[in-house]
Amino acid sequence: MARAEVHASEVRTERSPSPAVPGEDKRSEGRTENKDLVLALEQGQHQVLGGAPANVAWHFGQAGGWARLVTRVGDDADGRRAVELLDDLVDTSLVQIDPDRATGEVTIRLDRGEPRFTLHPGRAWEHIACTDAVREAIRDAGVFVYGTLSQRTAAGLAQWQSAAEAAARALRVYDANLRPNDQASHAIGTALAHADVVKLNDREVGQLRDLFGWGDPVARLCAGEVPAGERPRAAGTAPRIVVVTHGAAGSTIHPLDGPALEIAGVHAAPGGDNVGCGDAYLALLLHGMTCGWDLAASGRIASRWAAAVAEVRGATPRFDDERIADLLETA
């Protein structure tokens, strides 16, 4: 069984556009929206479990791996429901309960089919603590996955740095998930400096080019470079694996040596959305890597699984066993 430690920057409930006819979901067998994940139904919206690192842990667990989630939720109905849902697939023993702040929430709107996110501030995930139990778990982890959001405050950055230091023996994976016009250069630079694997999409490559003045961000990252002002990576840790996703067009994986691997996109049947597809891709890429598959095979399965997620609404669909076996077919 694949084993990974997933450090999450947030668990959120996500308000997404509802189907045109609520309750009607004509989909093929094995490709279902998990109705148990719908926490509430409002006019024109439905509320589902989400948050990028939680999505990664969800899909990693659904594929047969084991992930422990470090995050913080409120002492409220949404937080309790989120933990209950995650418990099916993820080890939630390190999820923290905040007595004063509500569970995180983000509103999603679709703009020409692409999700646009509005975060609601002052929520529990912004105050994740790197406790002794968290540090001990991360020291034992084979993989440490992190994003950017929780490091935007001085307190959040300090807690994340403590976690990153504990991950000295783990494969450290940075899934940037940058918002458009993101200017948190220090948080992003520090996250890049610690990473052994970096996952970006095409837009984020452009953002790094503008933010750090890098003509070719992918080449710089592959070479193990860090942004100006950041502490150089330890000797012997460069280069990096860099993965760039291109939406429906597939992805490019830049391995430690040899030519780039072009991974073809997989057609997704209409009716879903793109929310969480990149998170699902990363989860299955890491699942393949921890199972000992080569990067090309891992990338193909990641692309296939991400397309299956794109066929449904929301980031955390539940697939039946037959569908999972089909998606994980390596031949």
Image (cartoon, rainbow, N blue to C red):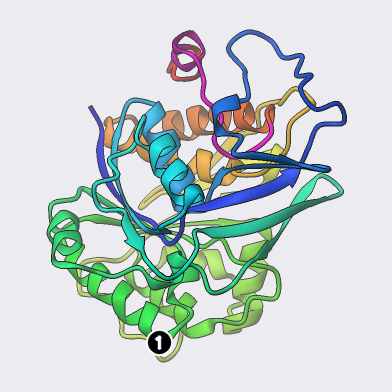
Q: Residue furthest bottom?
A: 229
The amino acid type of the residue labelled 1 equals: Ala
Question: Image height check: is 248 above or below 53?
Answer: above
Quarter of the image containing the N terminus? top left
Q: Looking at the image, is 281 positioned above or below residue 158? A: above
Q: Is residue 148 visible?
A: no
SS category of the residue bearing label 1: helix
x then y, percent, for residue 184: 55, 81
The reply to whether residue 222 is visible in this rendering is yes
Magenta stretch: dominant SS? Answer: loop
The one nearer the camera, 25 or 138, is: 25
Name the image quarter holding the C terminus.
top left
Report the span colored magenta: 313-325
Residue at figure coordinates x 82%, y 43% from the top left: 43
Label 1 sits on residue: 154
Depth check, front residue: 101 or 198? 101
- The number of callouts visible is 1
> Is 318 in the magenta?
yes
Tell me where residue 237 appears, x and y as whole percent: 25, 66
Q: What is the x, y in percent for residue 119?
A: 63, 66
Vertical position of residue 186 compared to residue 223: above or below: below
What residue is rendered at 37% in x and 66% in y? 99
Point 25% across, 53% down: residue: 94
Asked where in the image residue 203 lies, by quadrant, the reply is bottom right
Q: In the rendered structure, does residue 208 fall within the stretch colored magenta?
A: no
Q: Quadrant of residue 124?
A: bottom left
Using residue 270 as the reference point, say whether residue 83 is left or right of it. Answer: left
User: Relative to residue 282, is residue 114 drawn left or right?
Assistant: right
132 or 28, which is in the foreground?
132
Q: Is residue 251 above or below residue 193?
A: above
